Amino acid sequence: MTTGDPLERGGAQADDVGLARTASLIDAARLEAPNNLLFDNGDLLQGNPMGDYVARARGLRMGEVHPMYRAMNLLGYDAANIGNHEFNYGLEFPLKSLSGADFPYVLANVYEVDGGDDPANDRHYFEPYVLLEREMTDTDGEVHTLTVGVIGFTPPQILQWDTSHLDGRVTVKGIVETAEALVPEMREAGADLVVAIPHSGLATSHPDGLRENATADLSKVDGIDAILFGHAHAVFSSESYKGFPGADIEAGTLNGALVDEAASRIVELTRDGSPVADDAEFVVVTDNYRASGGGTFPALDGSTIIVEAPETNRQVLVDYILSEGDIDPAADGNWRFAPLDGDVTAYFDTSPAAARAAGGERFERPGDAPNGFARYRLPMN
């Protein structure tokens, strides 16, 4: 079993997501399959106000237990990987946070900067892999001790996305090349099974340079038995991967390892009342993850960056609100949903003050939502 992005997806405060809900699913899965292991795939420390508060306002001492690890230690994780968002706060904060985990962390493709040109003596910044001794019971009731090797990877693009924190302190190597070097070493060290936990997605093509979403190629590395991946916020196996090279949707495998292009989301785009041509050029403000090619958004591969600021989008907004004191968040109606056929109604939960900010012309409030939010209804036809 594996989890990932718990803070990023936990901001909605809904009853059907979060670690509390996940804990019940983990308990149920353990009852269903007594031979089990539990891993986390990273992006654990950043993603909502609690993460920012602990990292930026409250702070954390070495050995002090981060709130997320208080919960995860109770769930009994076997091992975990480090995602790209762990580096958003620099190197010291994740090291302090990891010291409070009761389970081992692995990350194989991040190295110390030693100033030398010999890659053979590069030193890993984190433990690259771990060998876990676990007792498993076969169908005849016989107990066997297995050595399970666990290796982790993070996107090499962390050097672009968090260059202000990492430049000159660490270096990275490709996910696949690192696996090709270390998986045989894990087997020689006694691993009966090798589980790879890449914080990486699936893609069939890549921009020039080190591959961010390298899981498909990682599945071709000899010696890997299972891959628990996550990064692109997609579900595998699912119908969305039907026809993906090497994917067996029913079996949940990729190259044997256990794991509409013409559509447009925006139409009739205008600026100052005039249509926007396909070849028009704009300066777009976004986060460094997307600007550098994260998520493989069209035309964003890092080659068009003109200004790169060290502040996060969230911090820029916080600083602006603090400097202004009072702001007017009134909507200006500069975009709309495309018309939909039939009687369609959208529901969403947000602040009780949202109707006042939006003018309340189209929104209806049928009732309250959990945790102090209000529920709104928006007719779409």
Image (tube, helix red, strand yellow):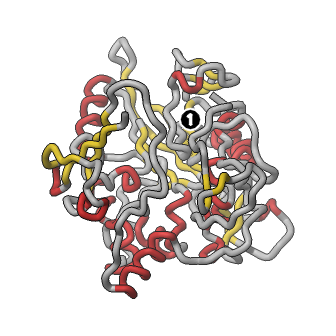
Q: Is residue 364 left or right of residue 175?
A: left
Location of residue 151 in the rendering, given as x and y in whole percent from the top left corner: 58, 46
The residue nearer to you, when weighing 186 against 378, is: 378
- Residue on which the image places disc 1: 227
Amino acid type for the residue under numbered disc 1: Ile
As helix, strand or loop, the secondary structure at mark 1 comes to strand
Location of residue 272 in the rendering, given as x and y in whole percent from the top left corner: 60, 62
Q: Residue at x 72, y 44 (%)?
A: 176
- Say whether residue 102 is visible: yes
The residue nearer to you, when weighing 67 against 244, is: 244
From the image, which quarter does the C terminus lie in? top left
Q: Is residue 180 left or right of residue 95?
A: right
From the image, which quarter does the N terminus lie in? top left
Q: Is residue 256 left or right of residue 138?
A: right
Location of residue 363 in the rendering, given as x and y in whole percent from the top left corner: 26, 49
The residue nearer to you, when weighing 95 against 351, is: 351
In the rendered image, the vertical position of residue 56 relative to residue 195, given as above or below: below
Q: Residue at x 30, y 29 (%)?
A: 29
In the rendered image, the vertical position of residue 82 relative to residue 344, given as above or below: below
